[in-house]
Amino acid sequence: MIGLDTAKAVFQVHGVNEAGKAELKRKLRRDELLPFFEKQQACRVVIEACGAGHHWARQLTRLGHHVELIAPEAARPFVKRGKKNDAADAAALCAAASQPDVKCVPIKTVEQQSTLSLHSTRTLLVKQKTMLVNAIRGMATEFGEVVPKGIDNIEKLVGTVEASEAVPEYGQEMIREMYAKALALQESIEVVEKKIVDHARHDEQAHRLATVPGIGPITASLIVATVGDNIGAFRSGRHFAAWLGLVPRQHSTGGKTRLGRITKAGNCEIRRMLVLGATSMVYRAEKWNSAAGAWLRSLLERRPVRLATVALANKMARVAWALLTRKEVYHAKGRVVAAAEVAA
């Protein structure tokens, strides 16, 4: 087995035999990596699941090696305290991979990473736009100009600033400059979103997920690009929801179960999109005509809104797992058919 610590220019190799004894310790430059593995017999190669990990995993798989990606948190406990360096990281990968219960990250295809680049770009553009909008609000507040919450009120705020005599020329100019950049970012966001929606329409799995209430084309595309055909790695919908961090933390002892806030582990972007979708369904809970809608209304009567939102996101994650596993579309249960529909 070989533990490979990747970097931009320098790579550290740590090889062990069947007994776990170190047999190889070597530092390689980027252009030396593939020629080195071409000369090696087919073996088990362990790489940390990082930015370029999937790329190197595909390259080494083509050379006949069995490549496994391990999450950073799985290898971190095996790094000796006070000895954090590339060689120690490569050795820690071998130690972590030797554990019987180690779990590996599925290797993503080029197509998956290409689709995920759309989502990463959209997330970055939305973040930049939010920063600009908040900066506009903050700068206008310094001169006594405020508007209600909501991004739709920014245009009104800019108009108020331009008409105000209390805001000096430079202040107005900078606010107009930031507003223009925010509008340009919005145009870029819309272009990226059209490409994501187009992917969701033409991808069978994403199209299937989009039938779930609260899961739109963007969320469906993100789930498929992240998980895709590897949904079988999760034994049940409960495990998938736990991987997304939508389950409560446990601090139980002595037979007493103590549950806290959600773990927020796993893919934060999918979790965020599911929670946003669940929030939209909470707002329309009164008109949600199905067993899930009745369950949500009953939960809202007993629990706070935010708790109900996360619980619904958990349920949506389980439904998504079931649809991807069984290759089915969503069918609402318990829907009451109106008399007009029956007559029609």
Image: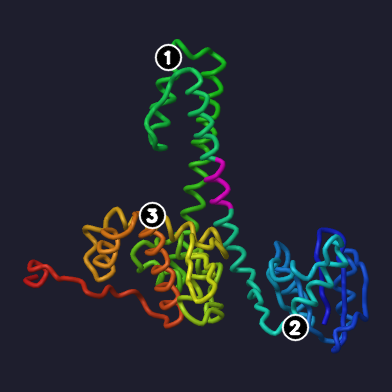
Mark 3–mark 1 distance (CA, rounded to whole Å): 39 Å
For label 2, the crowd category at 10 Å Cα-Cα, with few meaning under 14, some 14 to 19 and many 20 or more, is some
Main SS of the magenta segment? helix
* 125 falls in the magenta region: yes
Of the residues shown, which amino acid type is indicated by label 2?
Answer: His
Pointer 1 or 2: first along the chain: 2
Q: Position of residue 190 (x, y in %)?
A: 47, 48
Q: Residue furthest front?
A: 254
Q: Which mark is residue 306?
A: 3
Q: Residue at x 87, y 74 (%)?
A: 14
Q: Which mark is residue 240?
A: none
Residue span colored magenta:
121-128
Find out whether the residues at labels 3 and 1 contact each other: C-beta distance under 8 Å: no
Q: Residue at x 29, y 53 (%)?
A: 283
Mark 1–mark 2 distance (CA, rounded to whole Å): 67 Å
Pointer 3 or 1: first along the chain: 1
